[in-house]
Amino acid sequence: MAPTGPSLIGRRMIRVEDGPLLRGRGRFIDDLDIPGALHVAFLRSPVAHGRLKDIDASAAKALPGVHAVLSFADLRPVLTGDRIPQALPSGAIRFDVDPIVLAKDEVTYVGEPVAMVVADSRRVAEDALALIALDLDELPAVTDPVAGLEYGAPKARLDCPDNLVARQSIDYGDIDGAFAKAAHRIKARFRLHKGGGHSIETRGIAVRIDPVDDTLTIHANTQLPHRAKQILVAALGIGEQRIRVVAPDTGGGFGPKAAFHPEELALPAAALLLRRPLKWIEDRRENFVAAVGERDQDWDMEMAVDAGGRMLGLRGRLCHDHGSCTPYGVALAYNAGTNVIGPYVLPTYRLDINWCLTNFVPCAPTRGAGRPQGMYVMERLLDAVAETVGIARDEVRRRNMIQPTQMPYATPIKQRDGSTMTYDSGDYPECQRRALEAGGWADFPARQAAARKAGRYIGLGLANYVEATGRGPFESAGLRVGASGKIVITTGASAQGQGTKSMLVQLACDVLGVAPESIEVIAGDTAGIALGFGAFASRQAVTAGNAVHQAAIAVREKAIQTAAEMMEASAEDLELKDGAVQVKGVPHMKRTLAQIAHAIAGVPGFALPGGVTPGLAASIDFPAPALTYCNGTHICEAEADPETGMVRLLRYIVVHDSGRIINPMIVDGQVTGAVAHGIGATLYEWMRFDSQGQPQTVTYGDYILPSSDTVPPIEVIHMESPTPLNPLGVKGAAESGTIAAPAAIVSAVEDALHSFGVRIRNLPLTPERLLASIQAAG
Amino acid sequence: MEMTDKRTITVSVNGTKHTKEVPVRITLADFIRYELGLTGTHLGCEHGVCGACTILLDGRSARSCLMLAVQADGHEVLTVEGIAPGPDALHPLQEAFRDNHGLQCGFCTPGMLTTLLEFLGDNPDPTEQEVRVAISGNLCRCTGYQGIVLAALDAAKRMKAGRA
Amino acid sequence: MKLPPFEYACPTTLNEAIALLANHSGEAKPLAGGQSLMPMMAFRIAQPSLLVDLRKLPGMKEIKIGPDGVRLGALVRWRDVIDDKRLAVAHPLLKEAISHVAHYQIRNRGTVGGSCAHADPASEMPGIAQTCEAEFSVMGKAGARTIKAKDFFQGALTTALGADEIITEIHLPAWPAARRYGFQEFARRRGDFAMAGVALYYDLDGGKAANAHIGVFGVGDCQRRLPKAEAALNGKAVDEALAVKVGEAAAAEVEPQEDIHASAAYRRSLTGTLVERAIKAAMVR
């Protein structure tokens, strides 16, 4: 039965989240007033690598206001093992390096938690940190992933045989044959840094312990509450029914809040030990040194093309800085490697990926999850091909693009689960065409020449991307209409600011014809729904969106069926409108959803109407067996100052296709936010360390985030190629904006400085590096 | 218990006078959040760069993480909770943020609103570039600033219409 | 990142403030705007035993403009400088420089005296003080004294101030209406500390530059003037070619530091570019 009235899908609707947030009534982790809570601070390793011999906490314990100082040995009795069981298997892993709750006998990065102070207040806990003495023997540190894999390199961990923690390869086609017949071969080496997540809200955990029924409630601003619970159940060895993980309002995620960090186990373990509620709010310095993020990849690549600039093959080696343990599997570099092909036909490809253990905080995905680096490598090489072959940058891309007639397009690449990476829908050439048109590509040479006469160096850059979104295996949703008429949606999806709740409300309203105010969404609470995943891989509109959509349809069908029984009417004559089932064309003959819900909530001793099952509710676990691929094109206009190396972005255009759009306002916001991340990764963000592994950029004065005056106006243009893979036809959108940004910006800078012949490879592109490139080219 | 120097201070917050004994070492931000329970003022960096903790002190924006609570003794503070004219209405600036998708996670929002409240008072008819400069000391990681800048420009129009 | 423990005093007279500082044998710190001190305390890089809050001290919040120049009370905030319309004529270089200081919220709190006492090598105000040969009036246990800018700034975060001394006023000598000036600062984002910055001026004597003052900040461990570059400018007709030459002289003269933000060579190069641009800007004032 089709929904009545015009569809809400595709409409700009204001968000249900905004009212409280605008009034300062959000409920973020640090806003929760946990009665009787003690406050935690972590003593962290001051060195990148060392043998931990002793912790003397006697002076700290004597400080007034300090309740306890706990080390690994103190927590171990309430844990099932030495390591935090991560359970993200992969055949690529040579040896498991699960994280540890607190350092046991070896410290492996600056910032690794070694001991925890529990005190009346955070300030006293911090006072106590200074009173703890560590007896450490410093060991040589691995501070470069390439050097770390060389013969004779020191070991990043004494408990591992070497530093090569994982290796993967992508290998298809006759690569040697391709290079043998190539008209041109282009070699390039890229050292690509990508920064951290840097949500403005840091991480935080509050643990409540209920002495009456002996349960633990863990409030944590995690992207993956259900996974956190699963790990806690395994690590603490207590039953599922005794642990609840619930995420409050969360101030941005961007990846790092998806990984399970040691503090997330340390607090519940300490709460069990001390029988006290505990709270830990990460401060910004801790966030810099102890929250996972991305870091360095070294790509040594060579591309073979024919005389017309058509790709024949690509081969090379990717060395990935993994950090000191494995908190989140080994997807990051593989994503980068597979995403290289983007919207192009690449006939042969060989990439060896080596993961090097280093003495840095572990690496885990931040927004984009390796794809910006992969796309950057492809797009930079294509710009080089254009130059070598003597064709325009847009033309080289057109010649290599997958055509819409080839959709669905099965690439030769195997995904991490062994399935074929298949692009489901999209019109890549048309997407690029629209972007070029919007960006004034054809007229730009004239503008550029005019600017040059006025002493200004402006350039236009172009880059395409594809992103795998909507990762499964499934997401859960329940939708229940209460006897009050209030509708509650529960889901394993979680929200960090993406408007997830608004998106689900919009979908439910579309089917049920109710007002947004009548719906409440419980997301990110393991007590709300038994199974679920949460926020990663731009997946929630696809997975939770379709789950809610289907649950709402099931509820609508049931409401109509029940009302038909109640009104002794035929279901075909009924429709759901404005929160009531009514006889078509006779609006006063109706049963409200509340009445229907009340009727099938049941009355003792009376049968339910017409034999329907109890409750006006439905539960759907929407399976997402295949990824759906969004795509787009970025155009960036930049100005470069050849005397200082300063780059200023003037204009930014994104043509984006994430299939059918639910709320264009929210999609725009996801794209512009992600572009800003990409701008940060390209021009500003650089987590620096010295050769001993000491972090050098641990303030927001030293680690530079994009600001309102460095991000240009961003214009987002939508295309909609619905995916056949889910009923709504939707694809993910949240990370895509990051993916093409580095390539588009650098392409613009090279174009601005083409008269100097500047070649840019490494990221970030700082003014000093650019000036050096100009001088090297000159 | 902690041994620490304390003072009794009187601070007017959102029009209500509060007299409290506080440790001298706590910041104005911590005073507002933990002593008064007004948790709308957020802490993003605690070293004066992110701007999330911005409040208005005697009508002028200030980073509450860079002030001691005792320094606010005798002064008037406005926090995000005090911006809306009443429980059922939003300030035009807040409405503009809602209607222009000027917030996503909402964590930087209190600082954006307080900063813009002062700025739009100083400059009721700003250009886009002036808005971008005004909020350049407030970091947002969600929006790419696009929705915020549009909201500020829209708010200027709404506030002007409100005065007319 | 909560502040370490300290004691706090909020004196109402200068003498009281000085006595408090003097009695704490160097462990006390005056608190003016707090915009630099508070972050250092949050990171526990600074852990003074006593903070002496200067906010109630009388007579240090005024901007006085007279025939002998501009007198800035030490507690004058950046915002006061920006809002003071008289300064557009009385000291346009100061006005332009201060528009580059940090951000809105910081400019509402930070003070000129606090900035100079803190003496961050990348700050604008000490650069202006050096270029303009400012004089600092300070008061301490031993009484009042005046310190010339060139003697005041001694290195990164190091000044001639004694532990018991407080800046009361900063005097910038009178600014002739016909003076040519330029201000250039290089930072990644608006409001960031400068990687390099230049404040310069010269007067015209018979069509030629005279009395050239060229000061740099963010380059080296201290704001300073560049006498060799000044000599390259003095006595010459100013044109674009000369601007390039003076820039080269400045680049050769500075002793830049190397840190995570920039190499010494890059800062040297920036200095030359900025001096050249500042002179070109001065030419068309």
Image: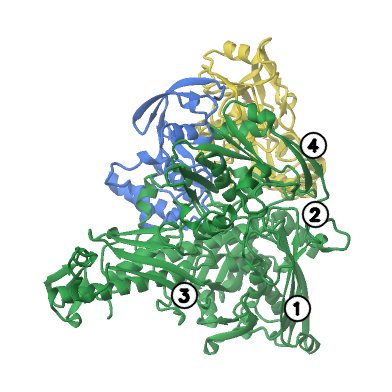
Instruction: Tell me whether the residue at label 4 lies in contact with that at label 1, contact meaning CB atoms closer than 8 angstroms.
Output: no
Say if labels 3 and 1 share a chain: yes
- In this view of the protein, can residue C189 be seen by the observer? no
Q: Quadrant of residue C213?
A: top right
Tell me which chain appears yellow.
Answer: C
Instruction: Tell me the chain of label 3.
Output: A
Q: Residue C78, how many percent across, how many down?
A: 54, 33
Q: Amino acid at mark 3?
A: Pro
Q: Residue C141, how many percent across, how many down?
A: 66, 10
Write down the residue under mark 2. Answer: A158
What colour is chain B?
blue
Instruction: Tell me the chain of label 4.
Output: C
Q: Amino acid at mark 2?
A: Leu
Say if labels 4 and 1 share a chain: no
Mark 1 or mark 2, earlier in chain: 2
Q: Residue A410, how many percent across, how many down?
A: 58, 85
Q: Amino acid at mark 4?
A: Ala
What colour is chain A?
green
Q: Amino acid at mark 1?
A: Arg
Instruction: Tell me the chain of label 1.
Output: A
The CA distance from mark 2 to mark 4 is 62 Å
Write down the residue under mark 3. Answer: A623
Instruction: Give the foreground label among 2 and 4.
Output: 2
Q: Which mark is residue A315?
A: 1
